[in-house]
Image (cartoon, rainbow, N blue to C red):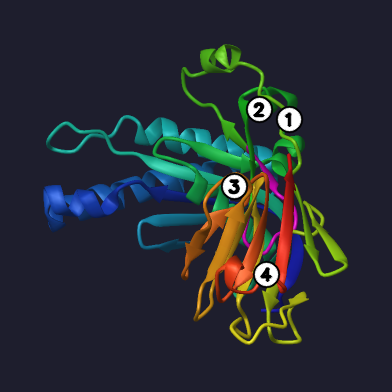
Amino acid sequence: MVSTTRNLAILFADISGSTKLYELLGNDEARAIVDHCLTIAKRACEDFGGRVVKTIGDEVMAAFPTADSAAQAAIEIQTGISKQRTSRGTPVAMHIGFHSGQAIEDENDVFGDCVNVAARMTAFASAGQIFTSAHTTAELSPVLRQRTRDQDAQTLKGKERDIGLFEVIWGDAEDELTAMSPRLARTPPKVTLTHAARAIELSEERSLLTLGRDARNDVVIADRKASRMHARIERRRDKFVFIDQSSNGTWVTVEGEPEITLRREELILRGRGQISFGHAFADDPTEIVVFTCQG
């Protein structure tokens, strides 16, 4: 089969807490419940024009021609699963995510960035929830779009920009939409780093910086106690995080606070301050990085 690329909506439906089911109910009943839930999910996908690509453990992956059909299938899955109970009377739940975009179909499987983002939408969802992206929400028909609520933006690994997250409301939960208060606008994060006479600004456009003795780093630290790949600074939603990956550690001073030592640890940068590599600031104040956070 020759691979083809086209627009699809990719959906993942995963049973929540399946490991706990096996622990509480035993293998036979848990397996029967999992199989029954997967059957409900697969049938709903097919009823709304989707193709079940595969089942992965306790998860179903399906491809749909439109975002609407994926959303309708997701709602149908949650409606069906919400009626299921174990022999102990406890409810069973699934968490679902879907995302639309260009995908590669090859040998009955589907690949590409669209699939990866859909999987991340599923990971963000809790039991009983359906999550999708802002991009996909914009493709929904007005009736279905009214059933969504903004869940702010999330940072996805490998993505320069945050991805807006929306929850699809299903069942009798529409009242929750009107009860939601307006979400405050998020101030885009920025941090300015100064090393010697050079100033570097990190923001949503540039969200990663590496520091160390090696010449391949964005900021080269000329201190023999610094490691070759000493640390990195990366954006996570509306914050920038300093991540030490060195042998000797990093000393960070936030203005007005005591100096902090990091050894293979992380610190959210805030306010103003300075960073020393491999030793305390007082031991050698010449080779430092000064930071100023905004937002």
Position above or below: 95 against 117: above
| Residue position marked by numbered label 2 in the rendering | 144
Position above or below: 80 against 270: above
206 left or right of 136 in image? right
Q: Distance between the residues labelled 4 and 1?
A: 60 Å
Q: Are marks 2 and 1 in contact (CB under 8 Å)?
A: yes
Q: Do the residues labelled 4 and 2 touch (CB within 8 Å)?
A: no
Q: Of residues 265 and 114, which is closer to you in this image?
A: 265
| Residue position marked by numbered label 3 in the rendering | 98
Q: Distance between the residues labelled 4 and 2?
A: 59 Å
The residue mark sitting in front, 1 or 3, is: 3
The amino acid on which the numbered mark 4 sits, given as a three-letter code, is Pro
61 left or right of 14 in image? right
Q: How crowded is mark 2: few (under 14 residues within 10 Å), some or many (20 or more)?
A: some
| Residue position marked by numbered label 4 in the rendering | 285
Residue 255 position within the rendered picture, expressed as x and y whole percent measured from the top left: 64, 47
The image's mark for residue 141 is 1
